[in-house]
Amino acid sequence: MGRASFDLRFLRRYNILMLRELFSFNLLGHSLGIDLGTTNTLIYRKGQGIVLNMPTVMALRNTNEEVIGVGEEARLMLGKTPQNIRAIRPLQDGVVADYEITRKMVSHFISLIQPGRVLIGPKLIIGVPTVATRVEKRALVDIAQEVGARRIHLVEEPVAAVIGADLPISEPVGNMVVDIGGGTSEAAITSLNGVVVSRSIRVAGDEMNLVISQYLREEYNLYIGEQMAEHIKISIGCALAEDKKEKIKIRGRDLKAGFPREIEIDSREMSSVLSPVLNTILDMIEATLEASPPALAGDIMERGICLTGGGARLRKLDEFVSARVKLPVWVVSEPLLSVVTGLGKLLENPGLLSQVEISTGLK
């Protein structure tokens, strides 16, 4: 009797464990849209919206490649790590620069959204720069396959941005979008579900941070880190000099004395410092306009230019661009979210996805 009672208890416990194991599995992975950017990664989950917005940074221990931080946790380590730890931004200029680190990071992000195991992996729509090479597309597809994706679609980022901005992508009208990210700036004219003309340069938000750092070294003998440069750009960065100057205090290391030092800078200084970077981006915009087919040029004159991407949040950038190109220019309400929002809309509209996705040309 005791033996039978023990066997029954064991069987019940075994069944409970098996049920827990069964319910830890999901039959299908979620359908996700991924905007894998140089600075930030955003993910949209079908039916739920944007579920992740994190810095594209990973921190590892040098001795054994152990992951010790991802996203915001790793970003806070930039420039502050000891010799046995490195904080890495695995994407450069909008494309994969470190394959293995990018794979680990994407896998981690997906695990945050979908904990537990799945029998069939997620469906992924990934945004890619228009100028991405075959090799760069291959890297993204390989990463998606390694994290278990059951289906992979690539969509050009300007197309996703146009969809995210609620512009008429499928109609025979020209839409011009300028996407200023962390590593690249891209201008594109779209019509009938595709890109007609595009230009891209590797000058964007990161370059703005760089010129701010260089200016402070040359003008004030002050060395600052990447995070401080970003803070300055966000706080008082401006494309046009403002009547009312805004000031902030910043801290860094004095290059002569070697000790920490604090100085005060203002927004007028920053508008002058950022001018060379912004003029380079404007040159790209003008080159795109010059290459526009005449039939679409009239649409752009009427509809104007749409600014998206994190760099579009720079104050008075729309006025700066408009003054140069003599066209209406406007910034979408959430410029950082435009691409991932467009990818999310494509998750909800498979018919449109089939029209706008690009062939990887990869077998």
Image (cartoon, rainbow, N blue to C red):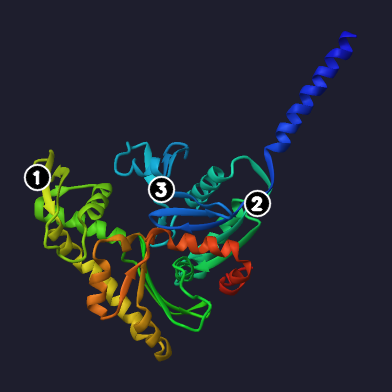
Q: Name the residue under label 1.
A: 256
Q: Which of marks 2 and 3 is in front?
A: 2
Mark pair 2, 1: CA separation: 56 Å
To which quarter of the image does residue 208 belong? bottom left
Residue at the image point whose x is 24% and y is 67% from the top? 277
Given residues 39 and 360, the one toward you in this image is 39
Callout 1 secondary element: loop
From this view, report whether residue 133 is shown above or below residue 236: below
Disc 2 packing (10 Å; few <14; some 14–19; many ≥20):
many
Given residues 343 and 106, the one toward you in this image is 343
Q: Where is residue 60 in the image (x, y as percent from the top left)?
A: 43, 40
Q: Nearer the viewer, mark 1 or mark 3?
A: 3
Mark pair 1, 3: CA separation: 32 Å
Residue at the image point whose x is 48% and y is 65% from the top? 128
Q: Left or right of 250: which side holds 110?
A: right
Q: Position of residue 35 (x, y in %)?
A: 47, 58
Q: Left or right of 15: which side holds 262?
A: left
Callout 3 secondary element: loop
Residue type for callout 2: Gly
Whether residues under marks 2 and 3 lie with C-beta atoms below 8 angstroms apart, the answer is no
Q: Name the residue under label 3.
A: 57
Q: Where is residue 215 in the image (x, y as percent from the top left)?
A: 15, 57
Q: Quadrant of the N terminus?
A: top right
Q: Earlier in the sequence, mark 2 or mark 3?
A: 3
To which quarter of the image does residue 97 belong? bottom left
Q: Mark 2 points at which residue?
A: 121
Q: In which quarter of the image is the C terminus?
A: bottom right
Disc 3 packing (10 Å; few <14; some 14–19; many ≥20):
many
Residue type for callout 1: Lys
Q: Can residue 139 be seen in this view?
A: no
Mark pair 2, 3: CA separation: 24 Å
Q: Earlier in the sequence, mark 2 or mark 1?
A: 2
